[in-house]
Image (cartoon, rainbow, N blue to C red):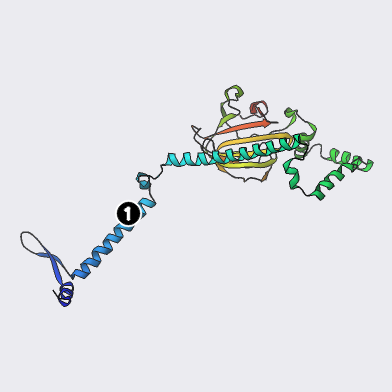
Amino acid sequence: MSKEGIRAKLRRKLQISVFTEKSYEQLFSIKLSPITAFIAIGFVAILLIVSVILLVAFTGLKEYIPGYPTGEERRLIMNNLQRSDSLLFEINRRDRMIADIRNALSGELPTEAYSHDSLLFEKKKSNVEIDFTKSEADSIFRAQIEAEERFNIAANATASYSSFGSNLELIHFFTPLKGVVTNKFGEGTGHYGIDIVNAESARVSSILDGTVIFAEWTVETGYIIQIQHDNNIVSIYKHNGKLLKKVGTHVSAGEAIALLGNSGELTTGPHLHFEMWYGGVPLDPENYISFE
């Protein structure tokens, strides 16, 4: 067959009609050429392919694709990634410690000392010779200020860190969350804090003035925020629903730092796991704070 004959057949109009079975009444008819039919079928096929791709990409159907990780596998991947980062940090710290010990045994300076500028090092040595004796005018001015601020609660709370020392009973701690204590402190059982139950999204407050040193999400304990206070006190708040502060932020005593939640795998309901540490030792918060 010649090319002209093939072109003529492709351009020839065809009519597709639909009739009823009994009366042969024509319901509808379509006139189209083979080229038009091919284009229409191709368009429908492309539309179906795009729809399937979008459906799989933006819905949970993608988890049924062989080789795609499930939600549990993704959580394990994130957990392993965090653990590998922590392990790498510990290995680097161990290597630096071994290098410092080796240098100390050989009579050399620690490795970190070489990173400081020699001029700065000389300035630090010269600071030892500075005389910090108190003058009579300074003593009079200090006594005057202390007399004026002796009834100031905020001033007394700040002064307690330096003057009370390890006597924590004299420090006023703000209650992080009012509620029912369902799980008490048990150092022997590995539970280094207490669990406080309250309504979800309740306000979680800082117990003292301090600086946020950690504010992240972990797989086991959800959203965590840690605050470093004066007098070597650290407070930890776990299983929050939302964090309101970032790392490096200075917070005041009683200021909202998070909202109560139910985050993390190690939780059975909305509650706050609260810990107090002093000098690296866990404390029973109920000995210092009333949660009723």
Q: Residues within 10 Å of mark 1 (few under 14, many from 20)?
A: few
Q: Is residue 54 left or right of residue 195?
A: left
Q: Position of residue 258 (x, y in %)?
A: 59, 41
* Viewer-closest of 170 and 96: 96
Which residue position is annotated with label 1?
A: 52
For the residue labelled by badge 1, is the local secondary structure a helix, a strand or a loop?
Answer: helix
Please tell me which residue lies in front, 100 or 199. Answer: 100
Residue 265 is situated, as x and y percent measured from the top left of the image, at: 49, 35
In terms of image quadrants, where is residue 136?
top right
The one nearer the camera, 212 or 14, is 14
The location of residue 196, given as percent across then percent down, is: 57, 31
Please state which amino acid type lies under the numbered disc 1: Val
Q: Is residue 6 above or below residue 79?
A: below
> In the drawing, does residue 11 fall left or right of residue 106?
left
Residue at (60% x, 22% y) in the render: 188
Residue sitting farthest toward the top: 188
Q: Please report the residue visible at 62 percent of the width from the left and 41 percent of the height from the top.
A: 214
| Residue in view at x 75 percent, y 45 percent | 114
> Is residue 41 something that shows in the picture?
yes
Q: Residue 242: horizontal and vertical position, in percent? A: 55, 43
Residue 66, placed above or below residue 165:
below
Instruction: Name the quadrant containing residue 150.
Output: top right
